[in-house]
């Protein structure tokens, strides 16, 4: 649960592939650890039982060799080791015989001063157990080479089965059992990390393989834009949820394509249908203006014609935006230079500027030989027309608009600067959006489409228009166009 919450808290740092791998490793690792603990526990219990069984048989053999007389107990030489295999070293075992009172009657070889616990064992045997066992971690009386080895102690009755009075206690070293458990610990100590490493590698590989179709869909859909709405993602061969996801994406793309084409067709037809009556209306107003002799009515017709021209401009702008937004290949690039496009439209811009007594200054700064760009002359003319017209529109009377064109071997930069009120900081981020105007309270005519159209044309040519910061009043727009190499020219034309 903690891992799940942590992964969900940082989705950017842990992608779905990493989360699947982490979950796989967590489940596999937890299962492996729990299984290893159970394996170690049951192995320990099994070895302990085998050890106790062998120790019990050994105690039976030893008890049969003990001679119990009325006043004495003796250990004859033991022969029980011959031909028998024990899970302990019988030569290191310790023997004592003690009375029910706790008194030690006789010690075995190397068992002097050996005095283990007995009271709890005695109680168990009296309750019906045939023997009792316990483990001793340290015995000082043991031989030097086995002082660090734990011992297993058995208490075995020697006489009466119901109320025994003599007990045999044997302590056998558990070195063999401990060695087996140590080997198991070593296997688990190195085996578990190796298993986890294999789980991590397997998880990364399997999650990558499972998610590859999804990644292919992501890569495909990233490249689908308005110009490529007819493309579809590939369907995987497996008939699973990923295939259903691909089919769903394709159905969605199909609906988007139909909706987009329907909207585009509607806007184009509506714009064309509007242009026809507006053109007729303009002709009729112009005819009435020519025949009108009253000055006041003539001014009314002039104002009406101006509004008709504005409406016509909006419709043409909307048609151009629809054409650009459709994503269709509307570029007809040719090798030319931005300075030549600007000089072609400069006389028209100077006529507009003359109405406000504004001077247009064109500065061409040559840092190298002129290198042409791949440009659509009609669209780039519209781009520069919109930028220069915008500068004239927001410039005060008797001011100037400066156009700078300078280039080097790699690119050409164009700057258009005016000295009006400038653009407020709050409006800068939306200045290139549709119907966005920096100053809606002024009497300057405009509908906020010019800069939007200019930015879209710039994007079609692989560049952007930037609103630069300047210390003086006014606005400064700039764009940089790379000089197209022959291969780049072919790519632009094909796209």
Image (cartoon, grey):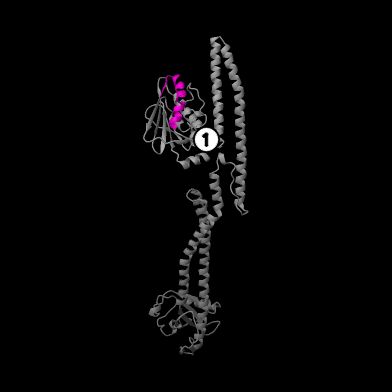
At x 55%, y 50%, the residue is 216
Q: Position of residue 203 (x, y in %)?
A: 52, 58
Which of 139/89 is in front? 89
Q: Residues within 10 Å of mark 1 (few under 14, many from 20)?
A: some
Q: Position of residue 35 (x, y in %)?
A: 53, 65
Which of 480/84 is in front? 480
Label 1: element kind: loop
**Residue 379, magenta (yes or no):** no
Q: Position of residue 384 (x, y in %)?
A: 46, 29
Residue 157 in view in this figure: no
Which of 264/14 is in front? 264
Residue 277 lies left or right of residue 346; in this view the side is: right
Task: State the predominant SS element of the stretch in magenta.
Answer: helix
Identify whether 294 is placed above or below 484.
above
Instruction: Read off the magenta span.
Output: 338-360
Task: Name the residue tied to disc 1.
Answer: 332
Residue 280 in view in this figure: yes
Q: Position of residue 430 (x, y in %)?
A: 48, 32
Residue 94 placement: quadrant: bottom left
**Residue 351, magenta (yes or no):** yes
Identify whether 203 is placed above or below 355.
below
> How many numbered badges does the structure rendering display?
1
Which of 148/397 is in front? 397
């Amino acid at each position: 649960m903690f891992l799940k919450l942590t992964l969900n808290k940082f989705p950017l740092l842990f992608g779905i592939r990493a989360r699947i791998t982490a979950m796989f490793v967590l489940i596999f690792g937890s299962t492996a650890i729990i299984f290893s603990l159970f394996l170690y526990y049951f192995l320990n219990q099994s070895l302990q039982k085998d050890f106790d069984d062998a120790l019990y048989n050994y105690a039976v053999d030893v008890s049969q060799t003990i001679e119990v007389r009325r006043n004495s107990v003796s250990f004859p030489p033991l022969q029980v080791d011959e031909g028998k295999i024990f899970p302990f070293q019988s030569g290191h075992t310790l023997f004592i015989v003690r009375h029910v009172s706790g008194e030690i009657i006789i010690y075995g070889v190397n068992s002097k001063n050996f005095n283990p616990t007995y009271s709890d064992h005695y109680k168990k045997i009296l309750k019906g157990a045939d023997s009792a066992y316990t483990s001793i971690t340290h015995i000082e009386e043991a031989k030097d080479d086995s002082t660090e080895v734990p011992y297993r102690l058995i208490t075995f009755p020697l006489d009466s089965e119901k109320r025994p009075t003599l007990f045999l206690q044997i302590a056998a070293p558990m070195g063999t059992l401990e060695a087996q458990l140590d080997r198991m610990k070593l296997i688990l100590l190195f085996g578990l990390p190796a298993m986890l490493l294999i789980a991590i590698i397997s998880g990364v590989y399997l999650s990558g393989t499972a998610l590859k179709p999804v990644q292919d869909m992501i890569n495909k859909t990233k490249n689908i834009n308005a110009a490529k709405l007819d493309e579809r993602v590939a369907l995987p061969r497996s008939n699973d949820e990923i295939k259903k996801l691909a089919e769903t994406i394709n159905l969605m793309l199909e609906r988007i394509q139909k909706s987009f084409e329907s909207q585009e067709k509607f806007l184009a037809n509506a714009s064309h249908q509007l242009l026809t009556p507006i053109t007729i209306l303009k002709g009729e107003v112009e005819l009435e203006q020519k025949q009108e002799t009253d000055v006041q009515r003539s001014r009314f017709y002039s104002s009406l014609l101006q509004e008709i021209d504005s409406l016509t401009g909006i419709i043409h702008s909307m048609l151009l935006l629809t054409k650009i937004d459709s994503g269709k290949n509307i570029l007809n690039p040719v090798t030319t230079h931005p300075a030549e496009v600007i000089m072609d439209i400069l006389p028209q811009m100077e006529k507009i500027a003359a109405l406000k007594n504004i001077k247009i200054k064109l500065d061409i700064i040559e840092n190298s030989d002129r290198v042409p760009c791949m440009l659509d002359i009609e669209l780039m003319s519209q781009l520069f027309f919109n930028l220069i017209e915008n500068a004239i529109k927001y410039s005060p009377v008797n001011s100037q608009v400066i156009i700078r064109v300078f280039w080097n071997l790699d690119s050409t930069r164009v700057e258009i600067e005016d000295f009006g009120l400038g653009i407020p900081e709050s409006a800068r981020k939306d200045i290139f959006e549709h119907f966005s105007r920096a100053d809606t309270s002024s009497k300057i005519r405009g509908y906020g489409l010019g800069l939007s159209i200019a930015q879209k044309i710039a994007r079609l040519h692989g560049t952007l228009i930037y609103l630069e910061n300047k210390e003086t009043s006014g606005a400064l727009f700039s764009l940089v166009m790379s000089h197209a190499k022959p291969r780049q020219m072919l790519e632009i034309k094909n796209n």
